[in-house]
Amino acid sequence: MKSRGIKYKRILIKLSGEALQNPKDGAPLDTEVLNSAADQIAAVKAQGVEIAIVVGGGNIYRGLAGTESGIDRTTGDYMGMLATVINSLALQSALERKGVYTRVMTSIAMAAVAEPFIRRRAMRHLEKGRVVIFGAGTGNPFFTTDSAAALRASEIGADLLVKGTKVDGIYTADPMKDPTAKRYKTITYQQAISKRLRVMDTAAFSLCQENNIPIIVCNFFKKGELARAIQGEPVGTLVRALALDKEIIMESLDDVLLEADDKMTKSIEHLKQGFTGLRTGKASPSLVENINVEYYGAPTRLRQLAGIATPEPRLIVINAYDPTALGAIEKAILAANIGVTPMNDGRVIRIPIPELSEERRKDLIKVGKRMAEEARVAIRGVRREANEQVKVLQKGSKITEDEEKSGLDEIQKYTDDFTRKVDGLLEAKEKDILAI
């Protein structure tokens, strides 16, 4: 049962190794920083929260950087894992000085200093109120400690992953270099990935997305910040699924902009998919791979039912994994009306791609223009909805009039940017169709 006022019962904290450095002279480990981290953790632990920690090793050694000095990547990564164990032991010592019982568990066996990682044992430690520190990353080279944090959070069933930094969230740009950078209050996993936000790596974001583990990126060393985060207060940046908390989706301007960006991006992806079905004079799997086929009563993408090859420049060959599906595949291709005639011999389907006539090319360009206009209309529809949402926020006193104006300006900028993307896709498709 969750403690009163606590939104997250079990959390995993990811600390970078660099966060433990002395801020003045750059010494790898600083006693004051360690004590500050231990104070934050102890304060939250006292509220009944189960805590696991993954700490990096970049303050001591970073495997990727070692390649520059001639050390091969695999060896360098193992050296980096050992560095994380040093940091884990240092943090354990700081926590135990505060009276917090801890266990260090490592992915690489080193019985003299730590327990081996065993999931069931780790769960037992957490249930008994011990802080568990996971060292040595995943135990495999080529994986970051961010990925290790997401993996361990998934394995222990964490309610939240906290990425502890010295910055108060995720920004549109580096706030140290760009004074105009703005902090995101909320952002989706997919937006974090597509915008290439470097606060965590793509694998970590993807793993948290798959297991629906929200991420809070916050200033770990700001007193009380971690406690506020686990109580569900709006600190730092929350990374989540778009519909994770429907009741807060429209609580801020960032949420409105995020949803608008997401919907406009989907309009572009839909247009790209539609353009793949506009036949040019060349054979390409993209012409048929996204066609939906009725397979045992369920619409299934053709690429999931068959291997698609182009052995000749003007020939597509479809080899169904289940030969009984050939008839349904043939029927679906004809229904798609993409200007080709499938030939089913009972074993494979061959689709010869005839050269396009001038008249057919003009027809395809007209279809492309229509699809592009539909995308523009969809984008303008998103703009209209977003503008209405911004006005609702202002009327509800959740944002100021100045923020309303800047929000409307930003939505228009999104609209212009995505409309230009539509124009660019159409221009490229027209050139493809007209190419002989």
Image (cartoon, rainbow, N blue to C red):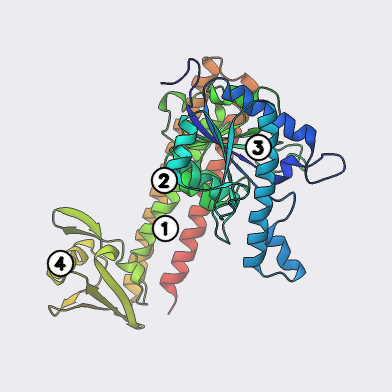
Q: Which residue corresponds to the image point at 54% horizontal and 50% vertical from the top-left?
A: 147
- In the picture of the structure, the residue carrying the numbered disc 2 is 210
Q: Nearer the viewer, mark 3 or mark 2?
A: 3
Q: Is residue 317 left or right of residue 70?
A: left
* Three-letter residue code for mark 1: Lys
Tell me the residue that label 4 is attached to.
Answer: 325
Earlier sequence position, callout 2 versus callout 1: 2
Give the spatial CA distance, label 4 vs label 1: 27 Å
Alpha-carbon span between mark 3 and mark 1? 52 Å
Nearer the observer, disc 4 or disc 2? 2
- The residue lying at 41 percent from left, 70 percent from top is 433
Percent x, y for residue 49?
A: 52, 25
Q: Quadrant of the C terminus?
A: bottom left
Q: Callout 4, which amino acid?
A: Ala
What is the CA distance from the residue labelled 3 to the residue labelled 2?
A: 31 Å
Under tag 1, what secondary structure? helix
Residue 202 appears left or right of 267? right
Q: Which residue is mark 1?
A: 272
Q: CA distance from mark 4 to mark 2?
A: 31 Å
Q: Which residue is mark 3?
A: 92
Q: Which image quadrant is residue 132 in?
A: top right
- Residue 422: give x, y in percent of width and height: 48, 53
Image coordinates of residue 99 in percent, x first then y, are 65, 25
Residue type of the residue flagged with mark 3:
Gln
Tag 4–tag 2 contact (CB < 8 Å)? no
